[in-house]
């Protein structure tokens, strides 16, 4: 009878930190006496920051090049550290935005106020910021479209965006009457 002898085979798996590894802190310079090795290679970065983690030099994107979106990679582990890290890179092209168009002019927002939208495509997200100004017949300034604008005095008017009462005026051609009779303004009459 023939017998088969089984021989045990052992394999060392690199599935975690090595014996003698320690908890690693994020540092701004290499503290390893034997030097540090770059272990990450981020893609499509507009700007890069570098930090050190044990004997490992970690580069990551602070910002992406135009047209790329950021994502975190990780967790990754190192043989000399008991903990893991993630880092930011920009591997994927943006799909872009649809209908992300800024307003060309201010438009009526609420009584005495106008608003204009500025839209920018941030990779795949359309971001909108608003600018406000006083409507015609009002003066002042507004950062929210609800406060800061006042009506021009005594039935006067103004151009949209007027910031001071001295920009308010009675328009040329306006007629009126008082105890002395009737009158007509022959030019715009501004408040002082």
Image (cartoon, rainbow, N blue to C red):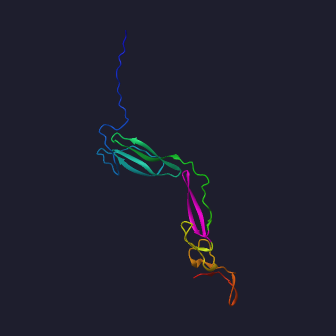
Q: In this view, does 115 lie above or below 91?
A: below
Q: How many marks on residues?
A: 0
Quadrant into which the N terminus falls: top left
Q: Residue 2, how many percent across, how many down?
A: 37, 10
Q: Is the magenta stretch mostly helix, strand or loop?
A: strand
Quarter residue 173 falls in:
bottom right
Give the farthest residue toward the front: 179
Q: Is residue 167 left or right of residue 24?
A: right
Percent of width and height locating residue 34: 30, 44
Position of residue 185 measured from the top left corner of the image (x, y, whole percent): 68, 83
Which residue is located at x 56 percent, y 62 percent? Answer: 130
Q: Magenta span has 104? A: no
Residue 41 percent coordinates (x, y)? 43, 45
Q: Which residue is drawn at 36% across and 13% down?
A: 3
Q: In which quarter of the image is residue 38?
A: top left
Q: Is residue 158 above or below residue 49?
A: below
Q: What stretch is highlighted in magenta?
A: 111-135
Q: Is residue 171 left or right of residue 146?
A: right
Query: For the C terminus, which image quadrant?
Result: bottom right
Q: In which quarter of the image is residue 172?
A: bottom right
117, 57: nearer the viewer: 117
Taking the magenta stretch, the answer to whether it contains residue 125 is yes
Residues 146 and 10: in front is 146
In the figure, 187 relative to 135: above or below?
below
């Amino acid at each position: 009878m023939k017998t088969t002898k089984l021989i045990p085979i052992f394999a060392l798996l690199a599935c975690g930190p090595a014996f003698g590894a320690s908890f690693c802190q994020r540092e701004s310079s290499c503290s390893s006496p034997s030097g540090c090795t770059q272990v990450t290679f981020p893609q499509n970065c507009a700007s890069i920051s570098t930090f050190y983690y044990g004997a490992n030099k970690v580069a990551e994107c602070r910002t992406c090049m135009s047209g790329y979106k950021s994502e975190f990679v990780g967790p990754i582990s190192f043989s000399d550290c008991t903990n893991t890290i993630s880092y930011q890179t920009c591997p994927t092209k943006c799909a872009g935005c649809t209908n992300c168009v800024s307003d060309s002019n201010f438009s009526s927002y609420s009584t005495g106020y106008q608003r204009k939208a500025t839209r920018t495509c941030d990779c795949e997200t359309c971001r909108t910021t608003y600018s406000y100004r006083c409507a015609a017949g009002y003066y002042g300034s507004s950062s929210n479209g609800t406060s800061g604008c006042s009506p021009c005095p005594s039935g006067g008017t103004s151009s949209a965006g007027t910031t001071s009462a001295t920009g308010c005026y009675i328009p040329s051609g306006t007629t009126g009457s008082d105890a002395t009779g009737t009158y007509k303004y022959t030019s715009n009459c501004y408040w002082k």
